Amino acid sequence: MQSLLSFDQAPPLAGPLRFFLTAPAFAAGAGLLLLLLGPGLLASRWTPGALAFTHLLTAGFMLQTMVGALLQILPVATGAGVEHPLGVARAVHGLFTGGLLLLLGGFLSFRPLYFQAAVGLFAAGLLIFLWAAGRALARVPASSPIQWALKLAAAGLAITVLLGLVLASALGFSLPWPLLQITGIHLSWGLVGWGVLLLSGVAYVVVPMFLLTPSFPGWLSRILAPGLFLALALWSGAEAAGLALAPWLGGVLMAGCGVFAGVTLWLLVRSKRARLDATHRYWRLGLGSGLAALTLLALGLLMPSLGGWNGWPLLFGVLILVGGFMSVISGMLYKIVPFLIWLHLQNAGQGQVLAPNMKKIMPESAMGRQMACHAAALALLAAAVLWPEWLARPAGAALLVSSLWLMRNLIGGVQVYRRHLQTIRGQLAASS
Amino acid sequence: MTPIRDYMSADHRRCDDLFAAVEQSLTRSGTAAADLFEAFCHATLAHFQAEEELLFPAFEQATGIRMGPTQMMRLEHQQMRTLMDEARAALVSGDEEGYSGAAETLLILMQQHNMKEENVLYPMCDENLAAYQAELMPLLQKATGSERS
């Protein structure tokens, strides 16, 4: 009964918004880094620039938006809100941002002190976030597929960050740990254990509801999250122990992710919405890129000539991070942010002053043009892996522009919020 | 056994289909979007009424919780009624962009509202109203206008 009473515990607007508004700055930072460092960044996945670029997208853009969205979605999806949402949001946002900046300093300078300090901030941010989200999730039984997916995704995030802390500690304190092996396990947990699991949990809800598609098949939503989590855990053990079973388990993981992306795409094609808005097109782009990334990964594992090419992991990274996760997340921001602004304005108006509708808060045309720019940046980045000398800097510039444009669109919504809040205050004062 | 959750969730999907029909009619000329919109409003308002006059009072009486989730749901019903009026006015005056903005906002509000009801409130109703289901279910079916078993 207690959890029911928390419907109105949706966090204040400033809680999730701080994550959503600053996240594009990290993606813009990745674009700027590529623009400044040029083709050298793309020489291999292990260059300091490539490591910094990757973490700006993952521990910057993806982590921040996903944490903000989780704080927002918990009360709606499970009936249990996070306690002290604003305080948690401020602390986690500050610690993750600070930790990421130090981590970037570490990658680019290789000074141990930066890694040591980054470990401290990320560990503190993770503890606070898991404490808050864990308490909320623990109050609800994991009865529905979305609740399972959210719980396992939170565990996946914890494992990802813990493995990241192990790696940063090894670099910060010169410990003789097997860095390459741990990196592979760290990124698999980040992409699948946190990324795909959270995305699937959110997709079960938002794809049928906002894009009016048929529901996800029950068998898929029931087995996907526990199945992927189990396969990932088994794969990690087999990989760490060097067992011959590891590639087979890796194949199971890839197949699971592929089925999820394929089924979601199939549902999207059956949407009853008459028009494809920016969110819908972003989902299609994201899932298509995700499938392309999985195909590339599988081909590289089967064909040593492709797998041995330096550009293979880079192209996979571009397709899965910029093409897959960034696309879907941007599409979701274009629904979540205008809706939250509308909701808070509607409540502020107390039924006497009407809020402008979502498309007046964020015009469809602005979102559609930014999406086209993002798609162009993705194409340039993929081509830059093949022809770095020619295209690395233009691709960096395109990612910088599309990310700043995303930020501009989101800030435009906040400006409408501020202006309208003043109108509401004026009208309510006049009528009282 | 979750008859309330099953029936009322199915009624949500019926309203979703009526909403989608309006949007699809706007892309084809010659079909009456205004009539389809009225059919959507009629079904949705009947659903609200069934909840506000039958389900919520029964839940409140059985649990003693009057100012909790049901109050929040009533407030959201009111917000959705306002958005329906905004969308209807835009549709009648031929303002397609105005309709699309109000309808999009209505859709998202409606869906997150449905999710809260389907995931939390309806299961609680099934749990707390098990003894009254025999008399409550036919009344809900009659009030929502679909009278399915």
Image (cartoon, coloured by chain):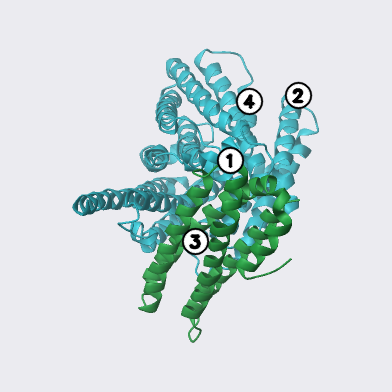
Helix, strand or loop at label 4? It is helix
Residue A221 position, x and y percent, is: 70, 49
Q: Nearer the viewer, residue B65 or A71?
A: B65
In this rendering, the answer to whether B29 lies above or below A67 is below
Q: Amino acid at mark 4?
A: Ile
Per the image, the residue denoted by label 2 is A241
Q: What colour denotes chain B?
A: green
The structure residue drawn at horizontal position 53% and vertical position 41%, both measured from the top left corner, is: A75
In this rendering, the answer to whether A81 lies above or below A216 is above
Mark 1 and mark 3 residues within 8 Å of each other at the beta carbon = no
Per the image, the residue denoted by label 3 is B107
Q: What colour denotes chain A?
A: cyan
Image side of residue A312 versus residue B71, left or right: right
The reply to the same-chain question for discs 2 and 4 is: yes
Q: Nearer the viewer, residue A384 or A195?
A: A195
Per the image, the residue denoted by label 4 is A182
